[in-house]
Amino acid sequence: MESNQGQWSIAEVAKSAGISSRSLRHYDAIGLLIPSSVSPSGYRFYGQPEVLRLQQILGFKELGLGLSDIAAILDSEVDPVARLEELSLQFSDNIERLQRQRESIHRAISIYRSGGTIVPTELFDGFDHTEYQQEVEERWGKQAYADADAWWNSMTEAERGNWRAVSEELTSAWTVAAARGIEPDSALAQELAARQDRWLSSMPGTPGAGSGHADSGYLLGLGELYVADERFASNYGGVRGAEFVAAALRVFVERRDGSVRA
């Protein structure tokens, strides 16, 4: 965009910003972006302050704000530099979220190609968790979801990679044991149940987390969920595999607590 003594025509500004001249005229009409000058023939021109303001308008629009909200922000007493720094931070957050979405999609591609294990928490990383938030909160409470969500978002990608590796290895071991027809009360099955217990209790938000053991009622309920919900049953080779995991967890809880909890 070439300047004519620091002034740009409406066509130049529209082309550079990737918007229509009609949008600029609308911004003028509602007082959101007023040209620095208008020629006798009615041509609008914009100076540096107006171009900088337009950048902020478009930036806040990208973040989903309405024009009236944008006007209130831009017309406030907030220092323009501080406002731009805040806008930059918000875009950084969005970039990080989009990168996580991209990685989630790549994991889905890998699962389709290799038949790998689905872990819903990571498959929807970066996306809207509203559906799963409600489900978790209904089963185990709002704090459980908040703690788990904060824990997951606090991890680096390397830490998430390590967590996935442990998760996939444990799930694979369960699947292999189920396919071999191992009894739920066997030493191998109980070793896997103990590992499942330690793995779950290491995650904030899990009932009993921090004590070294997941809550017994939680373990039993989770086993039932594996069987009832095909999303989780598929991780263990189907319903039969999930039933094996649930039965092994029930034996584990019975032996640990001395009685079976309903």
Image: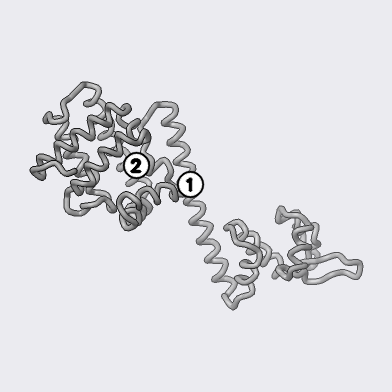
* Residue nearer the viewer, 10 or 116: 116
Quarter of the image with the N terminus is: bottom right
Residue 194, given in percent of the width and then of the height, sits at 16, 39
Considering only vertical position in the picture, is 43 above or below 221? below
Residue sitting at 47 percent across and 47 percent down? 127
Side of 78 where 202 appears, left or right: left
Q: Where's residue 60, x and y in %?
A: 60, 61
* Residue beneath the point at 37% across and 44% down: 121
Give residue 36's quadrant in the image.
bottom right
Which mark, by number, is residue 99? Answer: 1
Judging by the rendered image, the residue that carries numbered circle 2 is 161
Quick check: 102 left or right of 187?
Answer: right
Question: Which secondary structure, mark 1?
Answer: helix
Question: Around disc 1, counting alpha carbons within 10 Å, would you say few (fewer than 14), some (14 to 19), or many (20 or more)?
Answer: some
Q: Dot 2: within a 10 Å radius of its alpha carbon, few (fewer than 14), some, or many (20 or more) residues?
A: few
Identify the amino acid type marked 2: Gly
Q: Position of residue 129 (x, y in %)?
A: 43, 49
Q: In terms of image quadrants, where is residue 144? A: bottom left
Q: Nearer the viewer, residue 5 or 95?
A: 95
